[in-house]
Image (cartoon, helix red, strand yellow):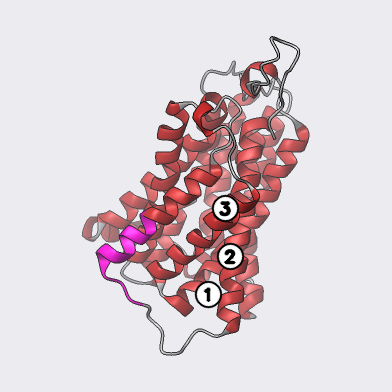
Amino acid sequence: MKSYEHGEQGSGRPISRAKTRNAPNRNATLVGLLAIVLFSAIVSLVRITAQNFGATLGAALIYTLTSVVMWIIRRPKRQRSFPLRYLLVCGALFVVYEVSVGLAVGLAHDATQALEVSVVNYLWPTLMVLLSLIGRRLTAKTWLVIPGALLASLGTAFVVGGDAGLHPASIAAHIASSPVPYVLAFGGAIAWAVYSVITPRISEGHDGITLFLTGVAVALWIVHFLTGSVPQRTHTAGIGAYIVLVAAALVIGAGYACWDAGIMHGNLTVLGSASYAAPVLSCTIGALALGASLTASFWQGVALVVVGSLIGWWATKDAGTESQS
């Protein structure tokens, strides 16, 4: 993914993408969109793995296997040339996001609170879109990104909430009685939005995704042993459980690799707007896997997500798209 210039002093050093390209690359944006599709399948695969191996152990196994695979097929080269700021800041944000979201869902008292926590986590596309506008020259048309993002966020709440709905008074009561899951979920949303926006600015064209996934695996094993968690299952995991485990690891590795390529070389605002499709696709995949029907509330949410995302795309398609400048 890195290009090398041998014409200047024959150094063969990687050229910083941020310095050599002013406009986002369309192919990279398409790769980032593929990541959104892969992310949508992660939730179902992780849920099945958690049922077979336990929540913390399952997550630790998934990311450990993902890390092993990534070191085999995507071993980072010239690690000493990685900017230290990139490794420390982006690596910390990546690990914080994964661990925070996992703990937020795990600490939820019931299914309703887990649902609310998921909605809080899905604020990251809106935050990413808003952060990507910082430092850009905004026109009257570009400002439409904000109502578009808010509309898509509302649609996400409809999609995730389903017919049960999300009630503000009930959510406020849950936050007051048990704020930690919500704080973790919101902190994770901020971390992922910031990671997605600053990675292309400070990475200097380097890709540390393999190192970051390894850091997540280490953190999850620490959490597993510190919490004293044990697998919550009454049967021995069969071959099917291990197949799902491998599938989850491969999908996560491919998803994050595609996402990093997209945010480093593609259009951040387009990717942020398209990211609202992740909960829609995730709920659709889950419903198909469980043989459940998709409700009227789901389709209302889909309509809002589509309209909001299209507004965001239209508002920025001619705005210079200097996400990497």
* For marks 3 and 1 on the same chain, the one whose residue lies earlier in the sequence: 1
Q: Identity of the amino acid at label 2?
A: Ala
Q: Is residue 117 above or below residue 144?
A: below
Q: Is residue 222 magenta?
A: yes
Looking at this rendering, what residue extends furthest in the left direction?
177
Write the residue at 23% across / 56% down.
Answer: 176
* Label 1 element class: helix
Write the residue at 50% across / 29% down.
Answer: 80
Question: x, y (%) of residue 125?
Answer: 54, 43
Q: Are marks 1 and 2 in contact (CB under 8 Å)?
A: yes
Question: x, y (%) of residue 253?
Answer: 60, 54
Q: Is residue 254 magenta?
A: no
Q: Is residue 202 above or below residue 88?
A: above
Frontmost residue, 47 versus 183: 47
Is residue 7 left or right of 294 when viewed as pictured? right
Write the residue at 66% across / 38% down.
Answer: 262
Label at residue 98: none
Q: Quadrant of the N terminus?
A: top right
* Residue stretch rendered in magenta on the structure: 219-230
Label at residue 48: 1
* Label 2 element class: helix
Instruction: Name the residue tied to disc 2.
Output: 248
Mark 3 vs mark 1: give the one in front. 1
* For marks 1 and 2 on the same chain, the one whose residue lies earlier in the sequence: 1
Frontmost residue, 10 versus 47: 10
